[in-house]
Image (cartoon, rainbow, N blue to C red):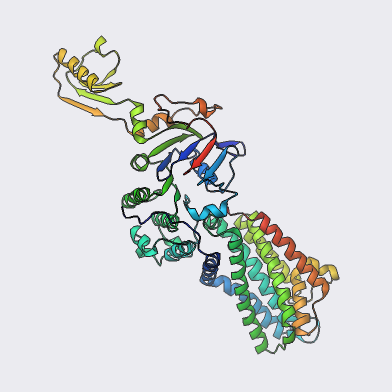
Amino acid sequence: MSGVFAPAPGRASMRSVVASQIRMELTLTARRGEAVVLAMGVPLLVLLGAGLTEVTNVPGDDRLAFVVPGVLALTVMSTAFTGQAITTGYERSYGVLKRLGASPLTRPGLLFAKTAAVLGLIVVQLIALAAVGLAVGWRPHFEAVLPALGITVLATAAYSGLALLMASLLRPEATTGAATLIYVLMLAAGGIMFAAPDLGTWGWFVLPLAAHAEALRETLSYGRSVPTAIWLSLGAWALVLVTAAARKFRWE
Amino acid sequence: MVVRYGDTTAVDGVSLTVSRGRVLSLLGHNGAGKTSLLQVCEGFRRADGGTARVLGLDPVDDHDALMPRLGIMLQSGGVYPWATAGEILRLFASFAATPLDVDMLLDRLGLRKFERTRWRRLSGGEQQRLSLAVALVGRPELVFLDEPTAGMDTEARHTTWRLIEELRADGVSVLLTTHLLDEAERLADEVVIMRSGVVAATGTPAELTAAAGIDLLEVRADPGLVPDGRLADLKVTEATPGGYAIAGALDAAVISDVLGWFAAKDAQVTAVNTRRRTLEDVYLALTTGEKPTGERPTGEKPTGEKPTGGNTTGEKAKVAR
């Protein structure tokens, strides 16, 4: 007998398993070009529309200082939450997650790969949008970029957690509907195109998008520090949602 | 093993063992409980009663240690619709320490020309072949194949059968579900026939067909002969004028006796034909008719079943100890 199929089982190094999965996630994201354009297109429209024209009333004299950080925050939500919730929901309904669950890729491995792919995509999108902002006259404080990145990582974690949680709990159609609805509500009430409703400090806990946008504005546009309430708000959202997602995540 | 979905009991006390390097075929209608049993062995759900041990491990608790050793072919789907066949197979190959050669596998399964075709553009049979390739690429020691040839054309089916025979020859253990009798008859070392969540019969294909013991003797002779005491142990019917079907325990001596009876009647015998019961006959006899209601499977023993040791008692499913 040929012995071609003689058993030789074993897992490749976890590092290369995860690397392959990240590559697959990114390949497929690039292949669904329309989703990437959508994730970038709406923020770009908002940036150019609300940033350069007087279509909306924004607080302060410097429209770009208000709008560009909001657009960056919106992009993070769009990719980490809306896009990921929809994709993961359909991957479950196609049985992809089940199939991966029956492979040497472990659950932490898959969650890590998904998060890394999303982070990579977000970095590219943020650089592109920030470059457009710079080109049309936004003048950020580069020395405040570290706290801005820190708060963005927290926001990404919170949005990813919510996306994976919803995809685990709801049918894919319901996930798509709910994720889109939340996106639209947040776009309207999140302080992106015009000022968010003034709910005081509690507002940062109710509207994570508004909190993230405000943190980016304070740092990048004004060179100030991130308000403590926003650190607490996004930290709490991240902790609760990531924990819930890890607990409720289902392969099937 | 017991598996319930709400009030429905899908698997009701099934015990089976797959021996290392052997092919066990779970045979049954849709809804007989085959896939539910596999789901437990694959760690997708816990049994509601009994235990499952796969390669000595618990499929749920030892998931991460077990998965690299298994090859799993799901009944359908399970692949990114927008990924190409080549990308998918290479992804799963990259998860394994010493994977099979991807190109060889694509060739063997006739998938080479679809290497750059996306999953959703593949036909059902092509998707099945790719799923099989994905199950095998990690060089597993045990594979679970859930209706592996469903949707395949005849040629692909035979290719798959040859491949499974080769797996067995190379020492891979196989648990496969099917509702194709010829598939089970050709591939399986042992067949477990399931019906409504219980084991209806178990044995090698030869045991199952022989144990059913209803070999048939067809004799064409003068019409209107009436059987007498000499054939009392046999069931003789004259289905068409002069066409006799004789059923019963037919060994060589009995057959010679039957022909002797025709000779004694001075009958002109023009044709003699023996027909051996196929697995299909056994299967149909076992799986049609009333669903057994509320009975423990251990109480159910179809006539003619050869006891093969420990298959109808206890509550354990062990796979490739």
Residue B32 in percent (x, y) is at 49, 37
Residue in the picture at 52% in, 54% down: B67
Determine whether A41 is above or below B184 in the image: below
Residue B308 in percent (x, y) is at 42, 31
Q: How many marks?
A: 0
| Quarter residue B104 falls in | bottom left
Determine whether B113 is above or below B27 in the image: below
Q: Is residue A207 visible?
A: no
In this image, B273 relative to A58: left or right? left
Residue A224 in percent (x, y) is at 80, 83
Determine whether A45 is above or below B279 in the image: below
- Nearer to us in this view, B204 or A157: B204
Question: Looking at this rendering, what residue extends furthest in the top direction?
Answer: B229
Residue in the picture at 47% in, 62% down: B97
- Nearer to us in this view, B278 or A9: A9
Q: Is residue A13 visible?
A: yes
In this image, A115 relative to B210: left or right? right
Quarter placement of the N terminus of chain B: top right
Residue in the picture at 80% in, 72% down: A230
Question: Looking at this rendering, what residue extends furthest in the right direction?
Answer: A200
Determine whether B134 is above or below A154 in the image: above
Residue B109 in percent (x, y) is at 35, 57
